[in-house]
Amino acid sequence: MELKSLKSFVAVATLKNFSAAARELHTVQPAISRHILSLEEELDTALFIRNTRYVKITAAGEQLLKEATEILAQVEGAKLRTQKIARGEIGSLKIGYLPSACLTFLPQLIKEYRSHYPNVDITLFEMTVSQQITAFTANQIDLGFSRPLPDNLTSNFDSKTIYTDRLTVILPNDHALSNKNQLSLYELKDEAFILFNRDEAVSLFDGIIRLCQENNFSPNIVGQPKHMQTLLTTVASGLGVGIAPYCTSALFTQGCTFVPISGSSPTILTQLHYKKLLLSPTAKAFIECSGKVMTMNPY
């Protein structure tokens, strides 16, 4: 049975008139008659009793009307759902994010996205850069907010810079240099350093080492925590000084003082990463939304 024949049948059965059914479907009466005849021949039964005065549906027609109505509703529902999925209006979205870099903007961005796409299921995963790379490989996340990816991976991803941060020195509140407005890194050459673990952010770690070397010393690294909050807690405990992006100041920082580095220091990017291939409609919609919301540096 063809859908157009079922549509003609339902229209005639509902309106009890071939001419009215033709007008309803924006066609001509002979076309409606052909569709009904085709159905009756296929089913080998009469669907209507009709003469010049009236059209009456048969018992077989009543049964077909019930089932045809359900079929057409299912087809229309499938059409609408398919169109919504194609537009990214329904589906799921899994996002990995680096918490220290995303605290100030990610909630706002998620709220803005949900205001336009309320029927998308969103799952957030707190992940370091290395964890996001593993999750991308296993297709466990669609998007990731983190530092720049290693050079050997950039060919497989597109990246969009969300904001640019700068490095800062993190000192215990009672440190002798904590009251300064800015610091030369050379002033810290004899300090014990707490740096974020290199395996979790290679470019960040290597950039800090280069900066220290440019200031004529190699840092005495006594700790490499894998979480920025742990780094702050370690510094606040007086076990060393830290160098990290200023965005870490949005974390729990009791006991820590943030002092700008004098002169120029490397910029630290927070980026949105996504695979170049097989990008889902929900991910495409989120990327477009992020471009509209992220118009200024949150720091």
Image (cartoon, rainbow, N blue to C red):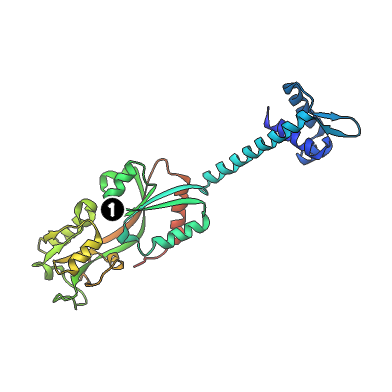
Give the residue drawn at x 51%, y 59%.
115
Q: Please provide percent x and percent y for residue 208.
A: 19, 60
> Nearest the camera: 187 or 25?
25
> Nearest the camera: 239 or 284?
239
Q: Please provide percent x and percent y for residue 31.
A: 78, 30
Residues packed near mark 1 inside 10 Å, few (<14), some (14 to 19) or many (20 plus)? many
Asked if residue 87 lies left or right of residue 44, the reply is left
What is the tally of numbered marks visible in this picture? 1
Quadrant of residue 100 within the rendered picture: bottom left
Kindly identify which residue carries mark 1.
128
On-image quarter of the N terminus = top right
Q: Please provide percent x and percent y for residue 54.
A: 88, 34
Give the residue drawn at x 89%, y 30%.
51
Q: Residue furthest left?
A: 190
Kindly state the secondary structure of the residue where label 1 is placed. Answer: loop
| 34 relative to 74, above or below | above
- Identified by mark 1, the residue type is Thr
Residue 234 visible in the snapshot: yes
Asked if residue 156 lies left or right of residue 1, the reply is left
Q: Please provide percent x and percent y for residue 48.
A: 81, 29
Give the residue drawn at x 62%, y 38%.
74
On-image quarter of the C terminus = bottom left
